[in-house]
Image: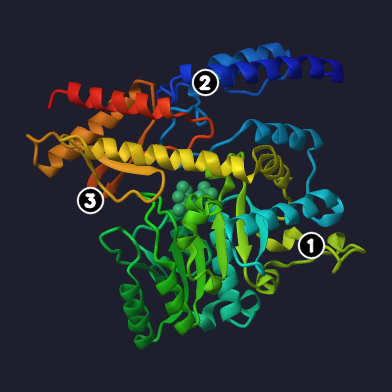
């Protein structure tokens, strides 16, 4: 492809992108293809001869697009959103154009310094402790792994990297039974041994129970095990339960444990002063992660990771081969030492574009709309005699199920709701996912899309009610 051809196709693509967003509501939200359907349309071998881009693009539209779920559709209410926005998309276009590998300051000083600045902006805007320092990681999963590795290294007085973990094992990590699977994965990958992840009981609101945590720690100490770290979640994946940080922080202080906070989704709510109660006790926190790529209109991937003790992180992660030694060493931040990967994308640009294009006020307004619409939905559900809330609503996730009064058998209710979810998603009109609350099949609806409007929530709710009531039981 020549540069002139690139220009021609780039213009075509931008027009397509605009049409896509204009018509996004008309695509089936969840891809409707069967397993293997895409694979079978793709040749077994890579092409020997160059193909015209028009042909490639046509195949993108014919073969690939039907196999895509439209995450940016305002009718996407599933999982947690990985929402994007037009300013963020423009930044991604520039990032792809520059195609810089920003592993160290010298390979693109602006990438490092912009990252430092935007992470500082966010920290202040969210009311996080001023002495914390931040870095952009790819995902919350990586951030949590980094946190536990740093905790391990600090516990061993910075010798486990050198000598291995054997002298210190078994190190115990605590979280609630509702914690995201990425914690389990970090424990596995960090070599702690999965049996050393202690899943502590939750209260009736599905929040980690601090007294159960303390009992587990005491039990472990008596058995000669070594409590290392606690992972508290602000906004669990199932129901957005908010673990009580203050009493957990006090326990961590008492037993000198590393406290990591996973606020992957809910962290964005800290931009709203009325939600700062979630971080009471934050002074005790050692590391904190939240994903602007979930609910802050910034393209995946962009995970904001903050630490209290930068030196502990650097001592855990630093490796300095000869070819990366530069004359600016010691005078600049080298984010390659702040995480696992060496090569780094220029992720700060999209965050910068988002923060400047929406402004904090603009972001807060959208968040408040999302929260208000979720509250309205909750009221609607509570007002029906054949629907029920399944967990307290803390933010913009509503957990509910269809419960026709004539049915009381729990297994039957599970089946009905499973069938309802399948029917709703097969319609292509919206996309919801499920969880289990106290073992009961529960539908989840998150009102968090960037360009969501109240009418989408209302339409979705009408459709859910209608579909449920039309089902033969
Ligand atoms: N933590 C929580 C609470 C989550 O809900 C999720 C994903 O939904 C994650 C961690 C994992 O996030 P990531 O995909 O950035 O690793």
- Of mark 2 and mark 3, the one earlier in the sequence is 2
Which image quadrant is residue 75 in?
A: top left
- C-alpha gap between disc 1 and disc 3: 47 Å
Residue holding disc 2: 24
Where residue 227 appears, x then y in whole percent?
Answer: 44, 79
Left-right relation of 436 to 265: left
Mark 2: few, some, or many residues within 10 Å (few <14, many ≥20)? some
Q: Image quadrant for the C terminus?
A: top left
Q: Is residue 93 left or right of residue 426?
A: right
SS label for mark 3 = loop
CB-based contact (under 8 Å), mark 2 and mark 3: no
Quarter location, residue 13: top right
For label 1, the residue is 333
| Near-viewer residue (400 or 192) | 400
Q: Which mark is residue 439?
A: 3
For mark 1, give the secondary structure: loop
- The numbered mark, 1 or 3, whose residue comes first in the sequence reads 1
Q: Earlier in the sequence, mark 2 or mark 1?
A: 2
Q: Position of residue 343 (x, y in %)?
A: 73, 51
């Amino acid at each position: 492809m020549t540069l002139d051809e690139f220009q021609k196709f780039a213009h075509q693509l931008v027009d397509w992108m605009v049409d896509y967003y204009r018509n996004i509501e008309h695509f089936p939200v969840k891809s409707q293809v069967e397993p293997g359907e895409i694979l079978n349309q793709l040749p077994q071998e890579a092409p020997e001869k160059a193909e015209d881009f028009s042909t490639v693009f046509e195949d993108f539209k014919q073969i690939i697009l039907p196999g895509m779920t439209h995450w940016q559709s305002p009718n996407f209410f599933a999982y947690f959103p990985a929402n994007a926005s037009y300013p963020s998309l423009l930044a991604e276009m520039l990032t792809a154009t520059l195609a810089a590998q920003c592993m160290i300051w010298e390979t693109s000083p602006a990438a490092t310094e912009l990252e430092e600045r935007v992470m500082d902006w966010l920290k202040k805007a969210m009311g996080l402790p001023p002495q914390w320092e931040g870095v952009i990681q790819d995902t919350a999963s990586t951030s949590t792994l980094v946190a536990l590795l740093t905790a391990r290294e600090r516990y061993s007085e910075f010798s486990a990297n050198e000598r291995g973990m054997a002298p210190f094992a078994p190190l115990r990590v605590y979280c609630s039974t509702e914690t995201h699977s990425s914690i389990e994965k970090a424990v596995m990958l960090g070599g702690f041994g999965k049996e050393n992840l202690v899943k502590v009981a939750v209260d009736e609101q599905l929040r980690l129970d601090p007294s159960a945590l303390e009992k587990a720690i005491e039990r472990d100490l008596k058995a000669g095990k070594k409590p290392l770290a606690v992972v508290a979640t602000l906004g669990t994946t199932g129901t957005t339960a908010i673990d009580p940080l203050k009493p957990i922080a006090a326990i961590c202080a008492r037993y000198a444990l590393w406290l990591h906070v996973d606020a992957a989704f809910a962290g964005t709510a800290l931009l709203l002063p009325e939600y700062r109660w979630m971080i009471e006790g934050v002074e005790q926190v050692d590391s904190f992660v939240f994903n602007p790529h979930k609910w802050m209109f910034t393209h995946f991937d962009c995970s904001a990771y903050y630490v209290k003790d930068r030196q502990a992180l650097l001592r855990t992660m630093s490796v300095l081969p000869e070819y990366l030694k530069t004359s600016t060493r010691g005078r600049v931040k080298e984010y390659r030492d702040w995480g696992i990967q060496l090569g780094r994308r220029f992720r700060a640009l999209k965050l910068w574009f988002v923060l400047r294009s929406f402004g904090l006020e603009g972001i807060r307004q959208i968040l408040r709309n999302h929260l208000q619409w979720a509250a309205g939905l909750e009221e609607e559900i509570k007002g029906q005699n054949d629907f029920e809330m399944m967990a307290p609503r803390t933010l913009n996730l509503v957990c509910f199920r269809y419960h026709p009064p004539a049915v009381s058998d729990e297994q039957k209710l599970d089946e009905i709701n499973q069938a309802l979810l399948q029917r709703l998603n097969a319609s292509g009109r919206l996309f919801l996912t499920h969880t289990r609350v106290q073992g009961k099949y529960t539908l989840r609806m998150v009102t968090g899309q960037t360009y969501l409007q109240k009418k989408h929530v209302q339409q979705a709710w009408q459709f859910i009610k209608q579909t449920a009531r039309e089902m033969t039981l």
